[in-house]
Image (cartoon, rainbow, N blue to C red):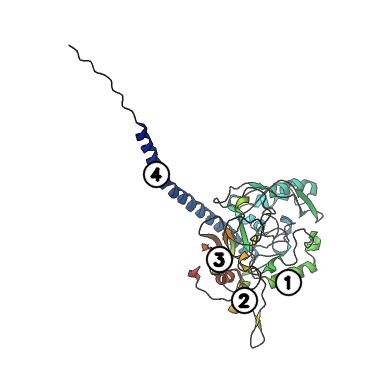
Amino acid sequence: MARKFKNVHSAFTLVELLVVIAIISVLVALLLPAVNMAVEAANKAQCMNNLKQMGTAASAHLERQKFFPTGGWGPKWVGFPDYGFGRTQPGGWLYSILPYLDQERLFNYNHLANNSAAFNDANAQQSVKDLVESPLKVCNCPSRRRSQSYPLRNSQTVFFGGETGSSSITIASMVAKSDYAANGGNTTECYETLAFDGSSYPQSYIEGSSSSWTKKFKLIQWRSFGICFAGSEVSPDYVRDGMTSTIMFSEKFLDKDNYQGGCQFGEDVCMFTGISCSNVRMVGTGLKFEPVTANNGVKSWSNKDAIQNATRIGTNPNEYLPYQDKRNDDGKFRYAMGSAHRVGFNVCMCDGSTREISFNIDPLIYSALGNREDAYNFDTTKF
């Protein structure tokens, strides 16, 4: 007699299913922070590499031109290749290092418009538009946003020179933006005599290259102690504190709620224009202080008390310290360095080396790092 076997189908009970789900949830909760930390570590390394590439390009610029990339003539001017480098170049530092980032095509945008050094301004209009809309991967920190063009808060009219020396174009849509800024020093003098509405900037190339404006730019250089400012031409001889002890480029603070949109404070223009708080930031107090007169009657900036006094004056010197990105509704931190990273922000020193600086750095040391000639000695392992 054949036996008959009854098929028995096993199944999860509701309790067993809930237990499995709970175990999976715990594992995900344990692994997710580790994954996020690994992603952030990779992003921070890429960000550091971006600054390293910029530092290498700036070093090549320094070797060829004998001075660091200039700050340009202000946010109403976009870079223009026929005007060369240094004080005669109205574009900012990022535009000046394009040839040394293997971006000669962008730097020479006008020549592509007409395949000749001589061209008419009508043809150059589209070329200028192409320039300001061209993102570069090296200019964006992956912890913050992708490398692409982003909207302006308001339309902007910029000068680009051309045959008349005063041609302009209105930019109303998307532009390339950078997450990095040059060191303007630890005083507000890097923006001296300049206004965002354009009233204080040269209105033509002839005006900007005149003896009166050359005198103004030299006066700004005498009063500024960073590496990049309006009309700057800083040679290594002016970096008296040493190339390893002076910041050249850094990540910049941004409103964390405005990475994708048109930010009013600190990102008002495209990254190829002349000096503004979009591409040059303060390092330290951002406050003006007077030199100390020694017993022999010689005025000197190389006095520790002068720097300490600078950190104590002003209504809110903390506005110029570095911060992790946060909301910035009133725009008071628009001149500050900073980053989207948790612990600190990345910098590139004048010798091309890169490192991370803590948000909790001593304000006195931070101010000294931004001043190329204060002669303040400090332990470089302490920041």
Q: What residue does disc 4 label?
A: 26
Q: What residue does disc 1 label?
A: 219
Q: Nearer the viewer, residue 186 or 104?
A: 186
Circle 4: residue type? Val
- Regarding mark 1 in the picture, which secondary structure is present there? helix
Q: What residue does disc 3 label?
A: 351
- Regarding mark 3 in the picture, which secondary structure is present there? loop
Residue 366 point in image, percent of width and height: 57, 69
Residue at coordinates 69% horizontally, 70% vertically from top-left? 221
- N-term-proximal mark, 4 vs 1: 4
Q: Nearer the viewer, residue 254 or 174?
A: 254
Q: What residue does disc 2 label?
A: 309
Vertical arrangement, residue 167 with respect to residue 8, above or below:
below
Residue 203 point in image, percent of width and height: 80, 59
- N-term-proximal mark, 3 vs 1: 1
Cβ atoms at labels 4 and 1 below 8 Å apart: no
User: For the residues marked 4 and 3, what is the alpha-carbon distance in whole angstroms?
Assistant: 48 Å
